[in-house]
Image: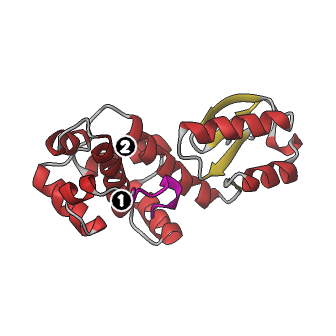
Amino acid sequence: MKPKNILYIKNMVCNRCIKVVNEELEKLGVAIKNISLGEVETEQSTETLPLVKIKEVLESNGFELIENKKAKAVEKIKSFLIKTIYENETVISETHKYSQLIEKELGLDYNYLSSLFSAQESITIEQYIILQKIERAKELLKYGELTLSEIAYKLGYSSVQHLSNQFKKITGFTASQFKSMTKNMRKPLDKIG
């Protein structure tokens, strides 16, 4: 039986999001046991929480309470991928390894999850991974601390050329052109996809 003390929240994509959600829920008197990207584990059952107020405060901060089981699974996939691409120091080199990690993380068949993700988001998990990796590459390029080769390795690309080709295809710019631009063309993580 699934725990009834977990809230699933859409658009929680960074540590700042976690902080905002934590602060807002505490203001409403919600006792939080644990909080991570996309999930809040509460001390009490969700059935006893002021869900209408929670929905309102989340929406006023750009988040959304997820109540649909399929949407919860998709949000878990997105949160897991963002965390893996942005925070994980382990290099994941092939898309099929992402599929294994996603399957293990959610405890469900990858083919089912892939179909569900595509139906809900109108893009494949693989396309979503590429978009997130390119967004991360943009961030790393703007910081200027790593070479393109180091960025390619960090993001699990088989070669600099592979990253360069995907970067140009997605952004319309070469990595060098992008790096020299003064306008920041990065996208918020919750708007990717």
Indicate the position of residue 31 as horizontal and vertical percent values.
Answer: 80, 29
Q: Quadrant of residue 143?
A: top left
**What residue does disc 2 label?**
85
Q: Quadrant of residue 93?
A: top left
Q: How is the image coloured?
A: secondary structure
Residue extending farthest front: 182
Task: Name the residue located 81 percent from the left edge and 54 percent from the top edge.
Answer: 56
User: Mark number for residue 3?
Assistant: none
Give the residues in magenta. 184-193
Indicate the position of residue 141 as horizontal and vertical percent values.
Answer: 28, 46
Q: Are marks 2 and 1 in contact (CB under 8 Å)?
A: no
Identify the mark nearer the N-term, 2 or 1: 2
Please tell me whether residue 36 belongs to the stretch shown in magenta: no
Indicate the position of residue 111 as horizontal and vertical percent values.
Answer: 39, 60
Task: Name the residue located 44 percent from the left edge and 46 percent from the top edge.
Answer: 82
Task: Name the residue located 88 percent from the left edge and 41 percent from the top edge.
Answer: 48
User: Is 156 placed above or below 116 here?
Assistant: above
Q: Nearer the viewer, residue 56 or 117?
A: 56
Q: Is residue 105 left or right of residue 51?
A: left
**What residue does disc 1 label?**
131
Q: Nearer the viewer, residue 158 or 104?
A: 158
Amino acid type, residue under disc 1 in the picture = Leu
